[in-house]
Amino acid sequence: MSKLTTPVLEALCGQVTRERYSSAVYLTLACFCDERNLPGFAKWHRARSCEEMGHAQKLIDYILDRDGQVCVDTINAPDCSCFNVLETFTTALEHERKVSHNIEELASVALRANDLTTFTFMGWFLLEQVEEEKTLEEIIARYQLEGGPSLLEKELGS
């Protein structure tokens, strides 16, 4: 028998889907960079894609640890229409801000259900989002300050 209420389980499963979608967003952005012969930026975005899949797996493992049934929904192809490299990072930042909101909502669902275990578990994700947004904001600022990709592209690829 599941130790998760239906609303909490549904919210967790929804977040699994969103994390998988996030992985697809970063993979799409990596391809954009690869197509423009910017392997450093592509490598950075690919690493984020793998990280997002890790987040999905962390959620799946938690659901299973709480005797819940995991629902893995299909994801749509992301619409990441970028015209330049800087837009790959601004697109990622906008996306991460949406993810932050979704995770805050999930934590609220857990709190309303008095599921303090899930609420505490979501704390890790909340702090991870602070880091994700801060990193992207710093990359965007550096890109703009340096006037282009040269040094930053090499640094992110290492």
Image (spheres, rainbow, N blue to C red):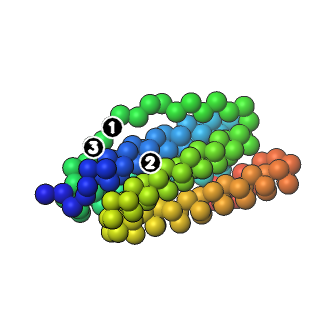
Across the whole image, how many numbered discs are drawn on residues? 3
Residue 48 position within the rendered picture, expressed as x and y whole percent measured from the top left: 53, 52
Give the amino acid at mark 1. Asp
Q: Is residue 64 visible?
A: no
Where is residue 42 shown, x and y percent of the image?
61, 45
**50 vs 110: above or below:** above
Residue 61 vs 92, above or below: the answer is: below
Using the numbered discs, state the Cα–Cα distance from disc 3 to disc 2 in whole angstroms: 13 Å
Q: Circle 3 — which element?
A: loop
**Mark 1 and mark 2: Cα distance apart in space:** 11 Å
Is residue 150 found left or right of 97 in the rendered image?
Answer: right
Q: Are marks 1 and 2 in contact (CB under 8 Å)?
A: no
Look at the numbered disc 2 and give the secondary structure of its residue.
Answer: helix
The image's mark for residue 19 is 2
Q: Mark 3 belongs to which amino acid? A: Cys
Is residue 114 in view from this perspective? Answer: yes
Q: Which residue is mark 3?
A: 71
**Mark 1 / mark 2, whichever is N-terminal:** 2
Query: What is the crowding at mark 1: few (fewer than 14 residues within 10 Å), some, or many (at least 20)?
Result: few
| Element at label 1 | loop
Q: Mark 3–mark 1 contact, CB under 8 Å?
A: yes
Q: Label 1, on which residue?
A: 73
